Image (cartoon, coloured by chain):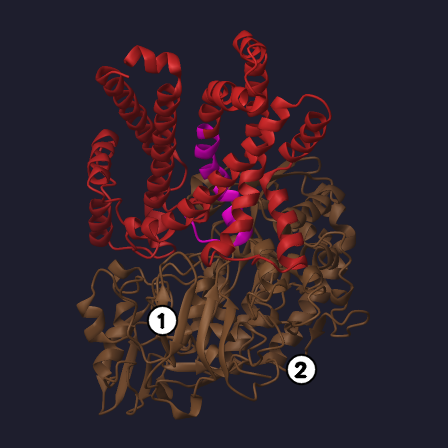
Chain colours: A brown, B red
Amino acid sequence: MPTPRRTPLRPALALVAVLALGLSACSGSDGSDSSGHEATFDTDTTTTPAATGPVDSFTWYGDYRSPATLDPIKVADYPELTVIPNLCESLLDTGPGYEPRPGLASAWEQVDPRTVRFTLRADVTFSDGSPMTREDVLFSLRRNLDPALASSYSILYQGVAAIEPYGTDQVEVTFTEPNAVFLKGMNTLGGAVISKAFAEAHPDDLGTPGTGVLCTGPYVLDSWDGVGPLTLERSPQYWNSEREPLAEQVRFEFPAEAKALANAIRTGAVDGGFNIPAEVIPSLRETGSGELWLGAEGSTPQNLDIIVSDLKKGPLADAAVRRALSGAVDREALVRTAFAGAADPLYAVAGPGLWGYAQERYRAAYDEIEKAATGAATDGRAAVEQAGVSGTGLTLAYPGGIEMYRTTATVVQQAAKELGLEMEIVALPLAQYYSLFSDASVRADYDAFLTMNYTQVQEPAFMYGFIGNKDGSQNYGGYDNPEVDRLLREAFGEPDDDARAELVIAAQAILSEELPWIPLVAPRAAVYLDEAVTGVPLTFAYMGTAWAASVGAP
Amino acid sequence: MTVRELLRTVGAMCVSILAASFVVFASLYAAPGDAESVLFGSTTPTDEVRAAVRDQYRLDDPFLVRYVHWLGSVAHGDFGTSFVGGQSVATRLGATAPTTLALVGLAGLLLVVIGIALGVPMGLRPGRVDTVLTTVVAVVAGIPTFVSATLLIAVFAVGLGWFPAYGADGLRGLVLPALSLALVSSAMLARITRASVRAESGREYVTTARARGLPSRVVVARHILPNAAGPVITAGGLLVAALFAGAIVVENAFGIAGLGSLLVSSVNRQDFPTVQAISLLLVVVFVLTNTLVDLAARGLDPRQRRRAA
C-alpha cells in the first residue's frame, strides 16, 4: 500500500530474532557467503533465475493469515498483497527492481503538475471474457475516493480533483495541488481495475469467499473458504499472450506461526515463499533441498524505527537527546541479533529500499547522514547531561510476543543506559499496540514505541510527508517544522525526478537532525524456493505484479 | 431420573450459557481498542459514512441494548459481519468449526481410549505394572501441548514421514494434532481411572464376590468397572470439553485453519464480532458437554437408576 504500513504481526513471522543460533551465512552484509551454502546472497539481480518450463502446480507461503478479502483496495496487508496481484492487474505493472512497466495502460504521462493521463489498452478482457472498458477503469479508480469503501489507498488519492475520460481511449486524473507521486502508485492495487458490472451486482459481498472478484489477471479464484488455504487456477482466457502463466494451479498456505511454516517447508508442504522469517532460516539448512535467497541492501522498503510519542514532553522532547539515543544504538548488533544478519543499519527513515529514482543523489546524501550519525556516538552522554535529563526515566513500548521487537527494545534500552537514561521497555498486547497508532491517549503513557513501516510506492517524498508534514498521517509526535513542510509539499508536486530528489534530500537533512522518528534498520528480502520452482522477484515488487505467472520449473 | 430433574438440569444449563454470553459480550465491550479505528484503519471517513457505520454496528446504542440485540441475532444464527473484509461471521465459523470438531472428536476418542487402557491395568495390578505405567503417565502429564506437538512433528512427520506436519487434509492430517492434543489429558484420565478402579477393588463387595468363587474376570467386568465408571466419565467429559481450549495451541502449531487459529488471529486484529462468536461457541460447547456428562454419569449410577425406577 502507499501508506506507511505498521506491521507488528508480519515481523512476528518474518523477522523474529535468531539469538545464539550463529547464523553464519548471514553474517556478511556485502554478499560474501563465507561459510554456509544454505543462503544465497544476491546483490546484483533482483530476481531468482528465470523459470525454463511449466509446472502443474505449486504451493506458496501466502503469509501469516488467510486474506481478509479479495477486493483489491479493502485491505492492504501481506496476505492480500501476495495473492490479489495475481487476480487483479493495475494500470501499471512492476518490474522486479520496482521499475514501472505498461500494465492495463499502454502509456502514461504527467501532462502538467496537476494532471496525469493514462492510455488504456484496447485488447484487455476480464476473466469471464467480457472486454475491459474505460467505464470499468473510471469506476475502479473512483472507488478509492469513496469514503464508505475506506480504500487502503485513499492517501494516494488525496488531492485528486477528478477522474475523467479524455480523448477516445484515455483516462485523466486531475489534482487540486501539484502531484507528482500519484503516478508512482499506479502499479499498486490502488491502480487495480475490477469489473464495474460485477462489482455493482455484488455491492455487499465483493471480495468475500462466495463471490470473489472479476478482474483481468492471469489467474482466477478456484477455492477459498475465507479462513484457510486458497487456490488459484489459470484464467481460462487470459488476454495477455506475452505472459502465459507457467503453472496451472497455485495453492497458498497461511501458517500463522513461524514454526508451522518451518515444518511445512521441511516436509515439502510448501514450495516457496516471500518474507521468510529469520527464525525459520536455521531449519532451512536441514532440508537439504531448496534454497534461501536473500536480497541486496534496499531489497525491501521496510524500515524499523523508534517513534517518539510526543515531541513536547519527556526527555525525548529535546532533539539533542534523540540524536544521542540514535547515535548510541548499536545497529550492527541489531542486524546480527534481531535479524539474523538479513538486514542493514538504517540512518534515514527513507533508506535505499525507497529510492525509486535519482539513486546517486539519494546515496550521496545518505552517506553523509550515516557519517554524521556514526561520528556523533561518542559525545552522547555529554549531550544528555547538557539537556539536564541525566538519570531521567522513560518508557519504550513494543508489540509483545515478537522476538525481533523484544531484542530491538533491549538493544535500545542498552543504548539509553549508556547515555545515563533509565529506559523501561514495555511489551504491549497486539490489540493495545495497534491503538497506539489511533489513540493519542494510549500514546501518552509511553515516551516512544517501536514500529516496522514500509510504503509500497518507491518515493521518499511520500514517506517523509507522512512523518514530517504537520498534518502527516503518521506524525504522531506533533512534529511541526514549516521549512520541512514547505520542502515536502514542493517535492510532492515536482515532476522532475532530480529536482524532486533535491527537495526531499533537503527535508531529509532536517528530519535526520531533528529525528521525530529514529531509524534503526532495514530488513532484506528473504525468499525460499525448493528445487521444483523458480522465477520470483527478490524484492517487494511482487506486491505490484502478477508474479505467480512467471513461476515455473527451474 | 425424573422429568423434573431433567428440566432442572437443562434450565441450569441455559442460565450458565446466558451468564457466560453476558460475560463474553461485556469483556469485549470493555476491551481496549475502538471499532472505528479497526474499520477505517488510517483513512478518515466523512461524518456521513461514520454515522452509517456506527449505525450498522450499533456503536452508539447503550450497552444493554447492544447486548440484547446481539443475543437476539445470535439466537437467530446471525453472528454479524466481521470487521475484517466484511465476511459474515457465521460463514467464517462454518468454514472452521467442522475442522475443529473433527480434531477435538478424534482427540477425545484418543484421550478416552489411551486414558482407560492405561488406567485400568494400573488400578487392577498394583506392583510392577502399576509402577512402570505410573512413571510413564507422570512423564506424559508433564509435557505441555506445544512441546508434544513439536516432538510428534519431529519424529512422525519430519523424521519418519508417516503423517503430514502441516495442514489438516483428511483424517491422516488430523492424527498428529489430535494425538498431541490428547496426550496430557489422557495421562490425567489414566490417573483418575487408576484411582477409581483401585478404590473399587478394595471394597467389601468385591472381596465377598471373590470369596464366593466368582472368576476374577467376572468380578472385574461386572462389579469393579461399572462401579468405577462414574468418576471416569465425569472427568473424561470435562477433559474432552477442555480440549477445545487446547485446540488453539495445536491448530497454530500444525497450521490448521480451525476455530482456535481463527480466534487468535481475530483477537490480534480486534475483530470483535468474530471473537465474540467463537468465545460464545466455546462456552456453549463446554456447558453442553458438561451437562451431557452429568446426565450420563447419573444414568450409569445404579443408586440413581434405582431411585428413578
Q: Chain of mark 1?
A: A
In terms of secondary structure, what is the magenta stretch mainly?
helix
> Which residue sits at x=30%, y=67%?
A212
Task: Give the side of residue A492 with respect to residue A236, left or right.
Answer: right
Q: Is residue A1 visible?
A: no
Q: Are marks 1 and 2 in contact (CB under 8 Å)?
A: no
Residue B223 horizontal/vertical position (percent): 49, 18
Residue placed at 56% from the left, 81% from the top? Answer: A535
Q: Secondary structure at mark 2?
A: loop
Residue B154 position, x and y percent, is: 66, 53
Secondary element type, mark 1: strand
Under mark 1, the amino acid is: Asp
Above or below, comparing residue A261 to residue A445 in the picture: below
Q: Nearer the viewer, residue A95 or B257?
A: B257
Q: Are marks 1 and 2 on the same chain?
A: yes
Amino acid tagged 2: Asp
> In the orientation shown, which residue stands out farthest toward the front?
B213
B149 horizontally vs A414: left or right? left
Query: Which residues lie in the magenta part?
Result: B237-258
Q: Which residue is mark 2?
A: A44
Q: Dividing the picture into quarters, in which one does residue B124 lie?
A: top right
Mark 1 or mark 2: which comes first in sequence?
2
In x, y percent, where is residue A508? 57, 66
Residue B295 within the magenta-colored segment of the rendering: no
Q: Which mark is residue A222?
A: 1
Q: Nearer the viewer, residue A444 or B110?
A: B110
Q: Is residue B177 above or below residue A249?
A: above
